[in-house]
Image: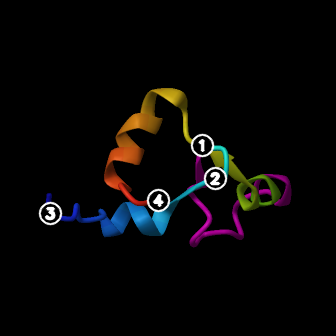
């Protein structure tokens, strides 16, 4: 069996946790930050988990994750 290539775009955006869940970072924190409330920017700092419906798709992109 040949090796499976990792989707490099997904590898930069997602990490697999120790329990096998998929961690992601929140969007909308790259620019235009002055117009956003500080409460919102604090919320955007924290990471969250990928929804169960999308988890299988992301894991397929990261075969060795």
> Whole-Å distance between the Cαs marked 2 and 1?
5 Å
First in sequence, mark 4 or 2: give its number.
Answer: 2
The one nearer the camera, 35 or 56, is 56
Farthest residue toward the left?
1
Q: Are marks 2 and 1 in contact (CB under 8 Å)?
A: yes
Work out whether mark 4 precedes mark 1 in sequence or the reverse, and give the earlier one: 1
Q: Nearer the viewer, residue 6 or 30?
A: 6
Q: Give the residue drawn at x 58%, y 44%.
A: 20
* Location of residue 22 in the rendering, given as x and y in whole percent from the top left corner: 56, 47
Measuring from the top left, give residue 59's x and y in whole percent. Answer: 41, 46
Q: Within the magenta stretch, is there residue 30?
A: yes
Q: Is residue 65 above or below residue 59?
A: below
Mark seen at residue 2: 3
Estimate the spatial distance between the alpha carbons at disc 4 and disc 2, rounded to whole Å: 9 Å
- List the residue tagged with mark 4: 65
- Which residue is identified by label 2? 17
Residue position for label 1:
21
Task: Point out the stretch of residues depicted in magenta.
Answer: 21-40
Task: From this view, report whether residue 20 is shown above or below residue 32.
Answer: above
User: Residue at 85% of width from left, 53% of height from top?
Assistant: 39
Mark 2 and mark 3 lie on one chain; the one further toward the N terminus is 3
Marks 2 and 3: CB-CB under 8 Å? Answer: no
Q: Earlier in the sequence, mark 4 or mark 3?
A: 3
Mark 2 to mark 3: distance in Å? 26 Å
For disc 1, the neighbor class at 10 Å (few under 14, some 14 to 19, many from 20) is some
Quarter of image, res 19 = top right
Estimate how packed mark 3 is, as few (under 14), some (14 to 19) or many (20 or more) residues with alpha carbons within 10 Å: few
Residues under labels 1 and 3: Cα distance?
Answer: 26 Å
The image quadrant that residue 10 belongs to is bottom left
């Amino acid at each position: 069996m040949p090796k499976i290539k990792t989707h490099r775009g997904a590898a930069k955006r997602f990490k697999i946790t120790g329990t096998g869940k998929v961690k992601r970072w929140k969007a909308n924190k790259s620019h235009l930050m002055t117009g956003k409330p500080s409460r919102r920017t604090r919320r955007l700092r924290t990471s969250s988990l990928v929804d169960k419906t999308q988890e299988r798709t992301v894991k397929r992109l990261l075969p060795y994750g």
